[in-house]
Amino acid sequence: MLNLIFYSTIIVLSIILMEFVAIFSHKYIMHGPGWFLHKSHHKTHNKKFELNDIYFIIFSIPSILCLSLGYLNENYILISIGIGILSYGLIYLILHDIIVHKRFGISINPQNVYLKKIKKSHLIHHSNQDKKNATNFGFISYL
């Protein structure tokens, strides 16, 4: 039972830490030198995919590595971190791509106060079409 609590705590802490990684990456990489990929996300279009989707691949690498190395070495801490990173990615996918941007043909109109704030905050971020002067770089925390 203590192991389950310990590894669950690592998963939750990994999810929380990933929000800070996402804020930093979004502000200083995506709106910095990685803008050439991310700008596709700030432009209106009807395409199924955008260059910004490459970030999904990039950000999945740490999770894949943690899960693979953890499994191969029977290291449950690494596995827990990998699960936390994966969980954050799934939360982000649901909140950002499905609820806010209505991608994949799924339209969910949130009634929950928290989800409404997330959506509003992110739409404020998208009101700026430029690399600079953007705000609200977080997602789960709508910072």
Image: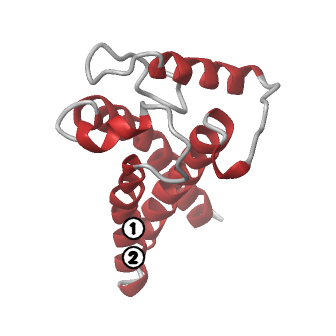
The part of the image, by quadrant, that contains residue 96 is top right
Q: Which residue is mark 1?
A: 78
Question: Could you say where residue 34 lies in the image, as x and y percent from the top left?
Answer: 23, 41
Q: The disc labelled 1 sits on which kind of residue?
A: Leu
Q: 24 left or right of 142?
A: left
**CB atoms at circles 2 and 1 under 8 Å apart?**
yes
Looking at the rendered image, the quarter that the N terminus falls into is bottom right
Q: Earlier in the sequence, mark 2 or mark 1?
A: 2
Q: Is 27 on the left-hand or right-hand side of 92?
A: left
Q: Secondary structure at mark 1?
A: helix
What amino acid does circle 2 point to?
Answer: Gly
Question: Is there any visible trace of residue 129 in the rendered image?
Answer: yes
On screen, 3 above or below 111?
below
Name the residue that disc number 2 marks.
70
Q: Residue furthest left?
A: 33
Whether residue 140 sits left or right of residue 22 in the image: it is right
Q: Position of residue 3 (x, y in %)?
A: 56, 66
Label 2, residues with CA under 10 Å away: few <14, some 14-19, many ≥20: some
The mark tally for this picture is 2
Q: Residue at x 61, y 25 (%)?
A: 118
